[in-house]
Image: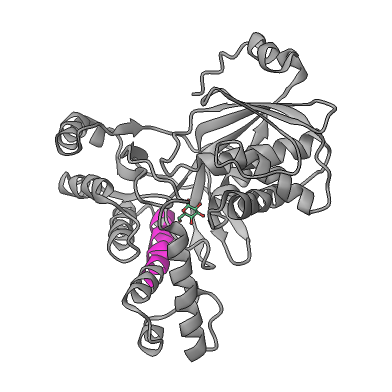
Amino acid sequence: MVDLNIESKQFLLRFGKPMEEFRHFSAPGRINIIGEHVDYLGGIVLPAAIDFSVHLWISPNKSDQFNLYSLDFDSLVKIKRPFQSSQIWSDYLIGVIVEIEKEGFHVPGFDAFLTGNIPQGAGLSSSASVEVVTGFAISSLFGFKFSREKIALLGQAAENHFVGTKCGIMDQFIIATGKEDHCISLNTETLEYSYHTFDLKGYEFSLINSNVKHSLKDSDYNQRRLECESALKKIKSANLNISQLYEAKEDDLKLAGLSTAEEKRVRHVIGEKNRTQAVVRGLENGDLTSVGKALFETHWSLSKLFEVSCEETDFIVSELERMGVEGARMIGGGFGGCILVLDKIGNFSQNQEEFQKKYIQKFGYPVDFYQFKISDGVREI
Ligand code: GLA
């Protein structure tokens, strides 16, 4: 999928040494079947890695300098300690170095070449993918032997502390641990997880990119987290048995004296827990109708209760519902990005043209349609 027609002369040009002196690593993007905006509340999520990917070539340079080149931005960053955030793509790599060093390891200088085809700001986790490939590559190159789970946590810490988005663990975790043809069921409180295959019985998942780019940092993502934290505090003061918002029940809503916004967020979380159970059952029993129904319900809950959708993604989902597609919802942080679609194989593709016309008419630019395969997590090529 990525155009890997990358020539040694590009490496010679940037770093004065041939491609053969670099090790090559790759990390996937991800989808999430269900369990949205619950991975920082102790919830269960069902993500899978997909065959969009970032590629990182890396080679030690026997100095204390980091020379980082992004082909996609055509940008070369040369950076030394003390590290400071520069609010650009290189933060995702530097943040990981910073987190590794907080653990008492010293990361020697290296040269790195980065490219990929995960659309940015599309809710497919391009940034988590860069963090995970960086952690995995550094660990392999310098013999740190971090587990995949540890690499996920380092990536999340980089995002939380260096980049500044208070994301949960889902994205980095699935990118580190993904397995071809499997999703995982991850308990984000304990980090216990298991692999699952599922038979879609003549149905398929695909993606529609609304092409509304989100930036989680500039968005209300961090604000949602704060609202959930304050809701939990209030519920806890009335119900001492609860430690994570994912454990909240309808009755807690009455007790807690929540603000209107807090109440809506908690209602989403309670509903999402029930829908996740329905989707797990549906996938196990091959009942794709109930899976599809839960996906639509999740979308409208994210839109009306969690308030992380936008006009364009709402429009896409309403149109799909009207056209009789089995299920669809926004995925990831929200405020734009991709819609996950569940439908009978080949069904929706017949209506794509008509759909595209309507979208362009309304918003003035097109969507993109993506097919994908469920793939492995981070690896050396
Ligand atoms: C983003 C975050 C994840 C998760 C999702 C919403 O992708 O990085 O941690 O919170 O949004 O489920």
In the rendered view, tell whether residue 317 sits above or below residue 134.
below
Q: Residue at x 47, y 76 (%)?
A: 230
Q: Is residue 257 magenta?
A: no
Residue 372 x, y percent position in the rendering = 43, 34
Quarter of the picture containing the C terminus is top right
Residue 68 x, y percent position in the rendering = 66, 29
Q: Main secondary structure of the magenta part?
A: helix
Residue 327 can be seen, yes or no: yes
Horizontal side, residue 347 vs residue 154: left or right: left
For residue 134, what is the image quadrant? top right
Q: Residue at x 43, y 52 (%)?
A: 333
Horizontal side, residue 39 vs residue 274: left or right: right
Q: Residue at x 15, y 36 (%)?
A: 358
Viewer-proximal residue among 231 and 139? 231
Name the residue at the top extreme: 9
Q: Residue at x 56, y 58 (%)?
A: 186
Horizontal side, residue 107 vs residue 50: left or right: right
Highlighted magenta segment, given as a residue range? 270-284
Viewer-proximal residue among 331 and 77? 77
